[in-house]
Amino acid sequence: MFGCCMLLDYINDRLWFGLDRRICLTEVVASLEGPCYLYDLRHFTKRYEDFRAAFADLRHTIHYAVKANAHPIFLRRIVELGGGADVVSGGELRRALACGMPPERIIFSGVGKSEAELRLAISAGIKQINVESVGEMRRIIALAEALRRPARVAFRFNPSVDAETHPYIATGFRSHKFGIDAEAVMACLALAQQAGRWVQVVGVSLHIGSQIVDVENFAVALRNTRPLVNAMREHGFALATFDVGGGFGIYYDTGDEHRETVNFARYATVVRQGVMGMAEEVLFEPGRFLVARCGILLTRVEYVKTTPYKTFVIVNTGMHHLIRPALYQAHHRILPLVRRPMPAHTVDVVGPLCESSDFLAQGIELTDVQEGDWLAVADAGAYARSMASEYNLHPFPDERFIIE
Ligand code: LLP
């Protein structure tokens, strides 16, 4: 399945990037003025195809989680590949439609969908809305009846799994704001039954969190959901769709995709067993797994500042372009574009913003770098540009693609 590859690798002490070591990065930065996200679309495509191959024996659709990276080039590629989109706002829904995504391939998740967003979704005739509260169910019924347009709904079940990931990105425990319990699902089902022909219940959805690498978490979630699916069946509802959500994580600490491949095979086994007989079609909502690895953030060293306490490598990007280290204590590898035969030092890599949280890495070993050197921040395809801001009025970085 996934060939073992290193997307970032040195040849003669110069850093190359992309599938098959496609581009020498020193050539890329020669024309750059500021920081830049660089993506290898071929790697994204490969991840999508590998994902599909792992579930070839199962009727399924991959709904790319647009929030991970909403660049139109990724969305158009998903359309070409026959995939769908998982959106969480009216903005993402409009973006997906503008990129040619057929409405019947779009699902809409999220706890706080506004009336305007739901109206847009129902009018567009999307595949399903994943309902996250009884209040939302009532709102959908009222809108579908007023618009005289069918609304297809699935219930996002909270399976009460305490997934092992950063607390800010765990979503499947009973104390989280996400999803509804079995009792609320049954209440929504009863409302849908009374509602008549404009509301159709199609399925159940899950999403227990993000950056989950221990696949046992998914196994428990699926086990905890089966009684609900059985109970719904007893009420006469056979599910058309069962949505497993996204959340499968990558190993940020290493560029070796082999371990990831092995773990993905475990994930596929767990999911295939867990969803057996549940629905006609299984849906997935992966974001990070498809897009994280294929992107890097290129940045220039502005200064190297040494104090009696620390060495700071001050670069022209920071938490405004990659907030993950500051927000989730995430670790992204940072590699110099030119490797010098110099000793490594312990440094903090920090940005220009007026905040002490503005760092990309703290206490890492980096070989001697100098003013004007360029660095590549690895695995910045997911939740980097999509969470970026113009804080301190710094412009957004450019985005470039290796297309074919
Ligand atoms: N489906 C739903 C309903 C979601 O909320 C998410 C992510 C996904 C799918 C995709 O999850 P993925 O496969 O990418 O793990 N900003 C954080 C991640 C937040 C994820 C939010 N929901 C980070 O940078 O780690």
Image (spheres, helix red, strand yellow):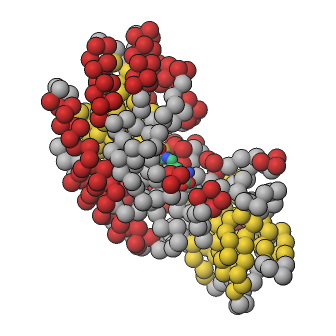
- Left or right: residue 130 compared with residue 89: left
Q: Position of residue 253 (x, y in %)?
A: 53, 72
Q: 135 or 102, which is in the foreground?
A: 135
Image: 145 above or below 370: above
Q: Residue furthest front?
A: 175
- Quadrant of the rendered structure where residue 282 is? top left
What residue sits 33% from the left and 54% below the top?
218
Q: Position of residue 43 (x, y in %)?
A: 49, 60
Q: Residue furthest left?
A: 234
Q: Position of residue 278 (x, y in %)?
A: 21, 41
Image: 353 above or below 91: below
What residue sits 44% from the left and 39% below the top?
178
Q: Quadrant of the N terminus?
A: bottom left
Q: Quadrant of the C terminus?
A: bottom right
- Left or right: residue 51 compared with residue 338: left
Image: 288 above or below 75: below
Q: Is residue 55 visible?
A: no
Q: Position of residue 42 (x, y in %)?
A: 50, 58
- Looking at the rendered structure, the number of numbered marks drawn on it comes to 0
- Left or right: residue 185 compared with residue 144: left
